[in-house]
Image: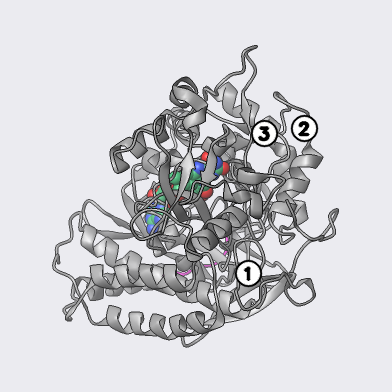
Amino acid sequence: MIEHDVVIVGAGLAGQSAALAAIAGGAKDVAILSKVHPVRSHSGAAQGGIAASLGNEAEDSVEMHDYDTVKGGDFLSDQDASLILTESAPEMIYALEHMGVVFSRTEDGKIAQRPFGGHSSPRACFAADRTGHAILHGLFEQVVKHDVKIYSEWYMLSIIVHDHGCHGIVVMNIDSGEIEVIKTKAVMFGTGGYGRIFQTTTNAFASTGDGAIISYRAGVPLEDTEFMQFHPTGLYRHGILASEGARGEGAYLINGEGERFMERYAAGMMELAPRDIVSRAEQTEIDEGRGGEEDGDAVYLDLRHLGRERIMERLPQIWQLSRDFQGIDMIEEPIPIQPTAHYSMGGIPTNVDGEVVYDEENTVLAGYYSAGECACVSTHGANRLGTNSLLEACVYGDRAGRSIAKYLSGGYEERPATPQVFSDAVAQATERADRVRAMDGPERLGDIRNDLKVAMTNKCGVYRDEGPLTELTDELREFRGRYARAHISDRTRRFNTEFLEAVELDHMIELAEVMVAGALARKESRGGHSRRDFPTRDDENFLKHTLANRAEDGTPDLTYKPVKIIRHEPVERTY
Ligand SMILES: Cc1cc2nc3c(=O)[nH]c(=O)nc-3n(C[C@H](O)[C@H](O)[C@H](O)COP(=O)(O)OP(=O)(O)OC[C@H]3O[C@@H](n4cnc5c(N)ncnc54)[C@H](O)[C@@H]3O)c2cc1C
């Protein structure tokens, strides 16, 4: 058995920020575990920017940032969380800068800021269109400097929760295939999102929602998973992101007829309306026959008027991506795009100190923390504004790390977990691993995965409706059946990626079930959740957070908890 005071699962911005904060707060023995090499975490793919009301390019304030965030979230944000996020932002940017993160500059040397959807002032600090990469590497240098123990390419299989406290995790060393326990005083999840359950997504292969489901299976509910963000500008047929930074720099959206269609949907903010609104506008153009390309399933991002110099200075990566994947030079031609699954607003419920809470009264589960995209402190409510998520991962990762340090130095009490608790956890994980490695049925894992993604995209995508969601509920049951009859061809232990994909598919099917249950029950349209049969927001019945608990029979059982409304009463959301 391995032992550490603290183990952090996930090496993205949330996990690394937490590790550094825990150490700064006095924690001595901190480890990070990641299924991919730390700097391959999805945070490194973030392009457009990180929000803070520095006011370097126009007037701005914390109050404006806070209001934009809550309005962007369609008033489902917990307002204590959104205020902490926006108040902490300027200090966080300077802390990152002092760490060595190189931000792009204005002419007079200040940190440059570009406009972003739903933000009423240019507030996105950026490093060209490689912002996540710059921050992730900046943090990683500090993590290495502070001798954080790193388990790179280790896979978490389960969390050990016993007697309302968390005692560690069960992990597999991917290289050897060995399963072990890491016993800890505190565990933190920064395991990222789950866009991979959709057919087209911007998300990395690792974004399969392991942490969310592992937590759910250990008895912690999942909050608001029906709120999935579809980003308006995924490269057509690939889903790869063309950053909103492009529209921040002034790019247009045009339909197959060459018309700037946002005029019809958000005349005030046009292309810079929040993502849920822009994605729905695009989907409507496509559905009503004004799309482009052979099958009419695309609209276009037009950057031609920005000119070569600006594109190559501010958006070099997306120029490269569209040239490599689509064979198009965006300086000369508009690029075909479509909505693509991007961000998970919901996740593991936490309070503003990063402590995981497990019921309607927000009771804390001792020793268990979470932050970043896998968590739901609900700053983003029903729809996240671009650039608020890197910020959230840093701010709430940092807060979780500080809470851990405080817990270890004061509040920690040795809780009784007998050796049996640990040996049972290993036995269970081993039994599951053996079962997966022995799968010998007729179904191919790849087919099940593809069918799942197509079904989720078609029936739980940008627009939703009772009929398709009900069908999908039945189909997901069939997917479980098919999974039980699946076949695995690699039965070895060492670096068995087929095994890992099988485990991830198991997680994805269950996550889809939770998401669809939430979407079916939420009979309203709010933020990223848009029902054709209930097209308006219904504050009377649904101004509340969904909590899905895992019932005895493994199906999601829904309850709700109130939204924290403090300063901003819900009003109609127009742009
Ligand atoms: C293409 C793209 C561009 C984006 N651009 C922006 C942007 O410009 N601005 C912005 O604010 N947001 C952006 N976002 C969103 C933002 O990048 C993410 O929400 C954020 O980086 C998530 O950070 P995280 O630390 O929570 O998780 P991630 O960075 O996703 O890291 C997850 C970590 O968990 C580990 N992990 C997961 N499961 C396991 C397991 N079972 N065992 C071991 N380890 C595990 C992984 O190895 C990884 O280290 C973008 C997202 C994408 C996909």
Question: Which is in the foreground here, disc 1 or disc 3?
Answer: 3
The reply, left or right, for residue 259 in relation to residue 211 is right
Inter-mark Cα distance, 1 to 3? 34 Å
Q: Mark 1 and ligand 1: say if the CB distance to the nearest ligand atom is below 8 Å.
A: no
| Residue, far top | 108
Q: Amino acid at mark 1?
A: Tyr
The answer to whether 568 is drawn above or below residue 532 in the figure is above
Q: Which mark is residue 60?
A: 2
Examine the structure image and report whether residue 416 is included in the region drawn in magenta.
yes
| Residue, far front | 257
Q: Which mark is residue 177?
A: none
The answer to which quarter of the image holds residue 421 is: bottom left
Residue for badge 3: 123
Residue for badge 1: 358
Examine the structure image and report whether residue 378 is included in the region drawn in magenta.
no
- Magenta span: predominant SS is loop
Q: Mark 3 and ligand 1: say if the CB distance to the nearest ligand atom is below 8 Å.
A: no
Tell me if residue 303 can be seen. Answer: yes
The x, y position of residue 271, in whole percent, is 60, 44
Q: Amino acid at mark 2?
A: Asp
Region in magenta: 414-420
The answer to whether 434 is drawn above or below residue 267 in the figure is below
Asked if the residue under mark 2 is in contact with the one under mark 3, i.e. CB atoms within 8 Å, the reply is yes
Q: Amino acid at mark 3?
A: Arg
Neighbor class of circle 1 (other Cα within 10 Å; few <14, some 14-19, many 20+) is many
Inter-mark Cα distance, 1 to 2? 37 Å
